[in-house]
Each structure stands twice: as structure tokens, then as C-alpha cells.
Amino acid sequence: MLPMKRKYDSVLNSSSKEQKVLWVIAILAVLSFLAAPAVVSSYFLRLMSLTLIYLILTTGLNIIAGYTGQVSLGQAGLYGIGAYTGAILAVKLGVPFWLCLPAAMVVAGLFGLVLGAPTLKVSGHYLALITIGFGVIVEKVLIEWQSLTGGAMGLSLPGITLFGQNLSEMGFYYLLLVLCLLTLLVTNNIVRSYFGRAFIAIRDNEIAASCMGVNLTSYKLLAFVLSAILAGAAGCLYAFYSVFISPDTFIFNLSIFFLLTIIVGGAGTIAGPIIGTMLLTIVPEYLHFLDDYRLIIYGALLILSVIGLPQGITGAFRNKFPGIVYFAPPADIPDDPLTDKSYELENNILLELENVSKDFGGLRAIDEFSMAVKSGTVHSLIGPNGAGKTTLINIITGVYQPSVGKVCFKGKDLLRLKPDRIALAGIGRTFQNVQVFDNLTVLENVMVGAHGKFRSNIWHNIFRIGKARQEEEKAHLQAWSLLKMVGLEDRASEPANSLSSGQQRLLEIARALAMEPDLLLLDEPAAGLNEIEIERLGEIIGRIKDKGITVFLIEHHIDFVMDISDVITVLNFGRKLTEGCPSEVQSNPEVIKAYLGTEAVEAC
Amino acid sequence: MLELIIAGLTMGSIYALLALAINIIYSTTGIINFAHGELVMLGGMFGIVLVVNSGLPIIAGMFIACGMVAMIAITLYYSTIRPFGDNLTSSLGWLMATLGAGIIFRNVAMLIWGTQPRPFPPLGSEELINVLGVRILPHEIWTLVITFLIAIFFTVVLDKTMLGSAIKATASNRNATRLMGISVERMVLACFTMSGAVAAVAGFLISPIVFAGPEMTATIGLKGFGAAIIGGLGSSRGAFAGGIMLGVLEALSMTMVTPGYKDAIAFLIMILAITIKPEGIFGVAYEKKV
Amino acid sequence: MLEINNIRVSYGKVEVIKDVSFHIEKGEVVVIIGANGAGKTTIMRTITGLMKPSIGSIVFKGQDISKISAERIVAAGITMCPEGRQVFPQHTVSQNLKLGAYLIRHNRKLVQERMEKMYELFPILKERQQQLAGTLSGGEQQMLAIARAMMVDPELLLLDEPSAGLAPIYVKNTFDMIKKLSERGTTILLVEQMAKMALGVADRAYVLETGRIVISGSAQEIMHDPRVEESYLGQKKS
């Protein structure tokens, strides 16, 4: 009794008022679904069963389209594959339902890989077209391959037997309810884990996600496969439920319907598909007189939602009641989020650029640039606008490949490594144009930074067992601690895009530190900060340096650079002008010339 | 066999017409109009009303239909694309919106005209004529010729006129274009008008072949996108080449598989093209600057 | 000729320009200098109509242009050479120039004349006529951007950080060019980071700091004002 009470208390104390209300609503909803067969007509029960089947699919679609931002218009095809796999196994091979279901999930999952693979390098309308094409191909194959699928005449299935008895309508309803709740639970656990944060990071900002260590290919494919598995499950259930299937169910219009439920309900939330699916499946039943106009209404809903309510119904609720998203601060936030670093490096050099050049078409942006950054120092790069500073950082972090030359980190060549592997090697960064994950909270932004430290796999997270929970708690605590270090702990539960640009820069630093990198690259961290904030930034950089983390930064605020740097490299027109300690650089006439122009030298 | 290729060229011309119209919108906005297939369908349906029901001569009917579909295209722009302002490439809202508009067009057409496809008069006589030993319909020749002329028109406009230069500048950098004294809005509207007119022409040309009905362009519209992508978005030459290629490949593949797979083959070609070379035959790839 | 009265401009939620007033007389060269993030580009974009002030007015030759569209402001006689050049990379040099002359495109003879004149002023462009603008070097793109902005013979030419990222030879060229254009009668407003060189060609100057004008005067006065050098290189370390 006692452990349960303690858990109950902790949930009670760590939830906001709005979250408690949501819990109550959720419990009431589940209870009403449980009690439904006793209260509603048989026709309505069938409607609710169909809703539950759809909900399994749309929850899956939400993972790839809502959370990961990859618009998939081919779910009807995966749905059909699941349905026909189940049907063919049952009809042609006499396989019982309980085996057909996992088989359908596996087959659909494999097709999810087939669907996802071509989409990895493209996005936007190319992605949409590939998924549409996939759906059409599946539809045509289902019609044409008559020997396998029965063609346009369709297939009839046997009923489901449980302990020798046929499953009744009510029995099927409860089966669907259980499976649906299971789906919601599993999906919830996935999206609340570091997997979910990685998905959202990809949606909000692919490049930034990659630079935080998220492997874009793996996670996009994972999202596709998860959505396909659920679509396949829904399809198989549908096949046994309606006892007869034919290809004209699995058409493009159905894919649009599924996507519409996500858009209307709210992408990227667990409740979104629930609201959307229920609304669009049940409400039309009360508006039979509008049946002829149903598709027209869907079309209009699509247009109106995207323009007027892009975040869907749940999005509107979140805006009205921000308390829905709330993370309770831990009782004790540790002051020291970072561990000390020590190295054994040749000449103490952590990062070395050897004769690097970069061309963009006819433009030589970086010209034979060499530089060595020693570990444990604060090394700054300055130079006039357009000198090539951001290009250099992008080369170091793998966003660009140099045309000539080498980049070595901890003695190893970084060439050809993708940004996520470079991040995992120990280089963290911030961006010149702030690239926070807009739709994640401040706290979650920082936790994405720690992505590379997670070792638990997806099963650990689905079942929320030991390893996964420990890692999550640790990351949680560290994130709070980092926020405290940069002074943002009061804004932890707010969406990142509600911060001022100066605060977003501080958030980016906290995020980059979550990985406990060996080298921290800061791209104009002081831009847009007032004097007090700049002082704070200097303190933070001092603390980082004390921990042994090497800092390399680009800046225009010369006062600030002079104050905190050990070494300054001056870049002009893509070439190194000079390098040395602050006082050397400041009194160098070449540097004065580079910033103020020749008149200054002539006037002196 | 030769007949098969002619049929492929004819369908390919239709795909090319769609691709050309899709391309002109892409050239100025950087997006694809997912309702384009339905614009073509509306062209065909207006044709039924004007030519079959009201007895107007085909050419007159075509011109009027061009005007009507152009106006619908402009309405489409104002309701589904304009609301997104200058931020077209950063989110996919326009994709959903144009998709939704297409659904509305199709289903309104179904309410008005029912779902039964109707016969549509072809250009020229209904009898096969003999050209260089091949038996061909005049309509097929007209389709090829008209498509070729329109392709030349677009190539000339886009590549050789100031208007074309301004249209492409709009897609490249809207603010810099405004600094030239060019109204971005007018450029986009001009393109939607042209796109709508060409859609109507396509509608008139395809209806005799597949019969005019609200469902007729459901898959043809998608193939138009495929053709544009295969040829290379941003290039009129590409749109033409992509369309013809798709039509011919699709026709030839009929010798190997049953006709029901025709659409599946076309989409498979499209998916392969996107995967292997997303910029198409005539397009150019770019390294993204952060 | 141009009067900016108490404008306030916001970029999203951030108020970038807090309260700015200044003026430009016909035939002058006026320069606005200031550190990064001070708001120089925002002022330029507001004058050309790409952004709109929330408060205040912009009066050009007696007409309030603060509310009209960017393309009509070009027609009224103000053109800009934007930050980062922003030439159309997929268009050739001559196509870029012709786009600059879009408003007079129907007068073929005039467009041809103007192009010849630009080729005279910038011989490199003549050599590279048929080359795609994206393949030009930074300095060449700068020449092109200025030439393009001059094609309609504007009364007021705006230049946003013309020296940014240019090699020394080109920087000198650019400022020489600005001087030449001014002598031909174009009124010029420019914003710059390369303070001293810009002041060398200017008549008057303003110093902008976080959205406000803090110093104003003749170019000579500002050039020798020690406060300017401080704000660029920081206080001297001993």
C-alpha cells in the first residue's frame, strides 16, 4: 500500500492544476468506453469499434507525421497491406487470428521500411508524392494480383475464436478497446522518452537535431516503421472485424481522412488523434443529411485547419491553458551539472585545422586556413562581416565539407563525418541564427542536447523499466541544473519560442552543454544581449572553462572577446590575418585596418 | 507496336501539358499546386457544358473554358496560398490546403455533373487517317502539336522575356525582386492565370480519350507531378521531356504487364526518379546554406 | 529630400528601432555607422518598404512613403543595394542588370544606353556579361548589385554594408564608385561597418547604437571622435 501511496502523492504534487483536470477527463473517458456496450445501441457500438480501429492507425500516423513532421499520405496503403496479410493468412493458410495479427504487423512494418527509405534524402512535396505514389501502387496491386488477393471481388474472412467460442460483437469491442489502450500507452511511453524528443527535434529543426547527435536516418526510419506497424495492426483488425474486405476501401481519400484527423485534432500530441478520430468518425453519423457533402466538408476542413488552426484543437487548448504542459522542478537542483575533463593530447591540441579551403561555386569562402585550439582554453575568432567565420564553424561541425584540407579533433580526422557523429565525438555548438526547437519546452530542448548519452533501447522505454527510468531521471536533473546555471530555470515549462532571442542563445548553450562536450563552439553568443546578460555570459563561460571544457567562439562584441579570451584568431576574407593574446591583437595595426578601413591607418 | 508508341506519345503530351502548368507555378513560388489535376478536370467539365450541351464550336469553347479555369486558379491562389505569405518553403500548410481544394473541386463537380463520364468530341474527325503508313487519329496529332507549341511558348516566355526573368526572380528572392520595382503578387497571379488556361486546354485534349467526368484526373494529376519531377522542376524543357518520357515508358510497359498495372508502373517510375535524382533530368542540385 | 520622423520598427516581438529621426538633403552622401545588431539594416529595409514602422513617418519629396508597397517606392525613385548583395544567382550579369531596369523595360533604347554606361563604370561586368551571377566573386557581385540598383537612375540610392566581405582592392573601388555616383548627382545613404572609409566619402554621418541615434554631425567631426573607435575595438587594454 505504502509504495502506491507514495507514487500517488508524487504524481499529485508534481502535476499542475490543468494536468490533474486532464487525468480526471482521461479516467472518465476510459470508464465511459468501458460502460458503453451496456448503454448504446448496437449500431453505435459498431461505430465506436471502427473508431477504435482507426485510432490505432492514426496514433501511429501521428508518430511519423505529427511528431517527426514527415507528411505521409500513404497510410491507407499500409492499412490495406495489414488487412490483406491477415485475410490471406486466415483464408488461404487457415492461420488463426492471434497469429495473423502479429504477422500483419511485421509485414506492414517491413513495408514501412520500403516506404521510408526513399524519403530520407528528400522532404516536403517530394516526400508527399512518394507516399501518395506508394498508396496508389498498393491499391493497384491489390486489384490486379487476383490470385493472391481475390482482386476486386474481395476476400471473406472467418470469425475469431476464443477458447473455442466465436467472438461476439461485444467481445470484439472489448478486444479493440484493450488493444487501443495498449497502443496509446506504448505510444505515450515512446514519445515521452528521448525517442519522442528526437522525433520532435527532427520536425522542428533537422540540422540542429543532427548537431545534437540525433541520427536523422535511423530515427526517421524508426518513426516510419512504428507508424507502419500500427497501421498494419489496424488493418488486420479491420479485416476480421468487417469479415469482408475489398481494394476499394484502401484508397487515397482514406489516407487524406487519416491525415485530416491528425490536423484537426492536433499533431504531435497523444490526445490529438483521439479527438480528431472521434470527431470525424462519430459526428458525421449525426449529420446524415450532409452525407453528399461529406468530402467537400473534409476538403474545406483541411484548408481551414491549416490556415486558421494549424496546431489543431489540442494546440488551441494548449495556448489557452498553458499549464497543461508543466514540469515540476525537483526538490533539490544540483549546482554542478558538469563533470571535470582531463586529457592526454599531443601538444595539448584539441582541435586542429590544416590548410582548409572552402569554395561555393566561384566564391572562395575560406582560403588555406590553419589553426590549432589548445585544450582548456577560451579561443576566439573575430573578423569583419562576411569574413567566413560561420562557414568555418559549419565545416568543423560537419554541416559543410571542406573543399581542401583536414580537420582533426582529439587526434582523429573528422572528415566526411556527419554532424551527428561529430557531436557524439565531443563537439557541441550553438548557432548564429538561433536554432532552438520551437515547439519543445525549454527543459526538453536541453534534454535533447543529452541525446547521445542515452543507452537504453526502445523496449526499455516502452516498458519504462530500470535503465530507461534512471537515464531519464538523470537527464532531467542535469537539464534543470544546466537551466539554473544559465538562469532560465523559471521558464522550464514554456515553449522555447516564447523566450527572447538573448534568452534563446543562453538556452542553446545549456543544450550544447548537456552532452558534456570536450569542445564547445559558440557562434555569436553575445548577439542581442544587454550588458547584464553579457556579464552573465562571461561568468558562464568562466565556469565552463573551469571544468576543463575548451571553448571556441565567434563574436563581434570586442570588449567581451578581449575580456574572456586566452587566444584570438583574426579572420579576414577567408584567410588568417593574425593570432595571439588579446593585447597583442588589439594593438596590431593590421587588425585596426581590417575593422575600420585604410583611412584609419593613414590618419594615424 | 508503332500504334502503342503513338498512344504513349499522346498520353505523354497530356502529362507534359500538366507538367508545364505545374512547372510555371513552381517557377514563381517554389511549390507544387496539388489541385492541378482538378483544374484540368474542370476544364473538361466546362467543355461538356459549353460544347456538348450548348453547342459552341470547340475552339470558342476552349477559349472560354481557359478564362473560366484561370479565374478558378486565381481563386485557388487567394484562398490556399496567399494566406501563407512569403513563408512558402518553411512549412507544408500550402500542400494540405491545395490538396483540400482539389477534393472540394472534385466533389462539387460530382454533385453538379454526377459521376458518369461522358463522351467528348475530339479535335478533327473521328476517323483514322493514314500518315506515313501509320493509322492515327487527327486528335492525337493535334494533341502533340498543341503541346509542343505550348511548351515552346513557355520556354520562350520563361527563358527569353523580361516577364520570365521576373517570374524566376520571384522564386529566387522575393525581397530582392521587390527592390527591382516588380510586384511579386502580380507575377504569381500571372503564373496562376497561365497555369489555369493550360489546364483547361489539357482538359479539352484528354476528355475525348478518357471521357469527361469528375474522377478522370484523379491519377492523371499525380502523373503530371511525376512528369514534372522526372524532367526537373524549374525547367519547361524538363516538363515537356518528362511528360513525353513518362507517357512512352508507360505505354511500352504495357507489353510486359497487364493493363491494370499501368498506373502503378507510372508511379514506380516517379518514385525511382525522386530517389535517384530528385532534381530531374534538366534540374540542378544545390548545397543548402545555413 | 528624405525625412525620417520618430520611427519605431519591430522585428517580430523585438523592437529593433526604438526612436529614430534623421534627414537627407538632395545631393548629399550620408552614412549611418554602428555596431552589429544596432539596427542599420532594419532602417534601410524600412525606408525601402520591405518593413513597416509601427509609429512615425517617412517623407520622401513631400510624400509619406511609410505605408506604400516596396515596388511603388522603387517607382518613386528610391533603390537599394541590399546587405549581402543579393544578386539573382541563377540569372546572368546582363539579366540582373535588365531586372534592375524592369520599370523602364519598354524603352529598349534607354535600357541599352544605361547598360552601356554601367559597363563603362564597371568594365569587369562587361567581361562577365553572360556569366551566371552566382559564379562571380564577392567584389564582382558588389559591382553588379550597385550597377543593378543604378539602372533606373534613382534619385536616392541606399547601400547596405557595401564593403562587407570584400577584398581590399574592391573596398577601395567601391568607395571610389560611391564618390563618383554622388558627383553625378545621385543622393546616397549608406550604412557601414568600415567606419573610416565610409566617412571619407560622406558629407554627414549618424552613429546608431541599439536602435537609437547617439551621435550626429559632419563626417569630419565624427571621423575624429574618439568615441567611435572605442565602440569598435573596445577600451584599450594595458
Image (spheres, helix red, strand yellow):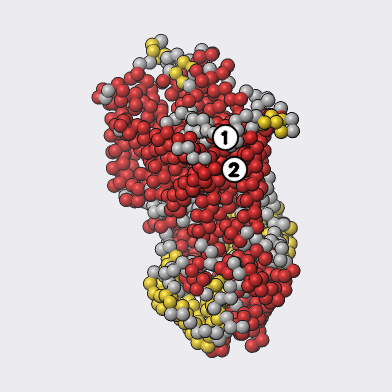
Residue at figure coordinates x 31%, y 30% from the top left: A288
Distance of mark 1 from mark 2, alpha carbons?
Answer: 17 Å
- In the structure shown, which secondary structural element does the residue marked by tag 2 occupy? helix
Task: Report which residue position mark 1 lands on.
Answer: B122
Relative to B122, A265 lies left or right: left
Look at label 2 and name its amino acid.
Answer: Leu
Task: Say above or below: A285 vs B232.
Answer: above
Residue A150 badge: none
Task: Say above or below: A424 vs A566.
Answer: above
Q: Is residue C49 visible?
A: yes
For the residue pair A582 and A578, the one nearer the viewer reads as A578
Percent position of residue B273, x then y: 64, 40
Residue at figure coordinates x 45%, y 38% from the top left: B54
Percent position of residue A411, x then y: 70, 54
Task: Say above or below: B166 vs C116.
Answer: above
Q: How many marks?
A: 2
Residue at figure coordinates x 62%, y 80% from the top left: C181
For the residue pair A601 and A70, the one nearer the viewer reads as A70
Residues indicated by labels 1 and 2 sit on the same polypeptide chain: yes
Residue B17 badge: 2
For the residue pair B43 and A263, the one nearer the viewer reads as B43
